[in-house]
Amino acid sequence: MTSEEIRNNVEKALNEIRPFLQSDGGDISLIGIEDDKLVKVQLEGACISCSVNQMTLKSGVEMTIKKYAPQIERVINIEA
């Protein structure tokens, strides 16, 4: 899978997750992908101060991204 295909698949995953985050007043943006293995995202809105945002990041975001792009090893949140 090319870097561009990985990026497209990560975007598809984020588009799947986004409605759930938005329903709680939050959102997510893709910051970048390093070495086709590490995805950097930024949680926004209500997600920034949410006490379970790390669980959301691991259980929801990372799991969904890996479904679309299995070679991704980790997803991290970049704080503003």
Image (cartoon, helix red, strand yellow):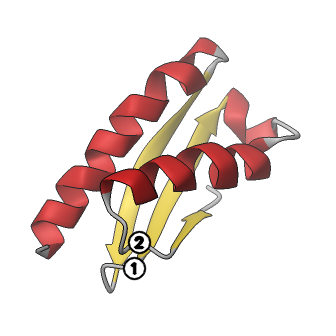
Q: Which residue corresponds to the image point at 35% horizontal and 71% vertical from the top-left?
A: 33
- Say which of 14 and 67 sits in front: 67
Q: Is residue 51 left or right of residue 33?
A: right
Task: Determine whether, in the image, residue 70 is placed left or right of residue 3.
Answer: right
Q: Is residue 4 above or below residue 57?
A: below
**Residue at image location 39% in from the left, 41% down from the top:** 14
The quadrant the C terminus occupies is bottom right
Residue drawn at point x = 37 percent, y = 67 percent: 70
- Are the residues flagged by discs 1 and 2 in contact, CB closer than 8 Å? yes
Separation of residues labelled 1 and 2 (CA atoms): 4 Å
Q: Which mark, by number, is residue 8?
A: none
Q: Residue furthest top?
A: 23
Residue 18 in the image: state x and y as whole percent: 46, 29
Left or right: 6 in relation to 25: left
Q: Residues within 10 Å of mark 2 (few under 14, many from 20)?
A: many
Type of amino acid at the residue the image marks with label 1: Lys
Quick one: 42 or 60, which is closer to the camera?
60
Residue 68, x across and y down, in percent: 32, 53
Q: Is residue 25 above or below residue 32?
A: above
Residue bearing the label numbered 1:
37
Secondary element at image label 2:
loop
Which residue type does callout 2 highlight?
Ile
Tell me if residue 42 comes above or below residue 7 in the rendering: above
Judged from the image, the secondary structure of the residue bearing numbered disc 1 is loop
| Residue wearing tag 2 | 72
Q: Tell me residue 30's x, y (percent).
A: 39, 53
The residue under the point 48% across, 65% down is 40
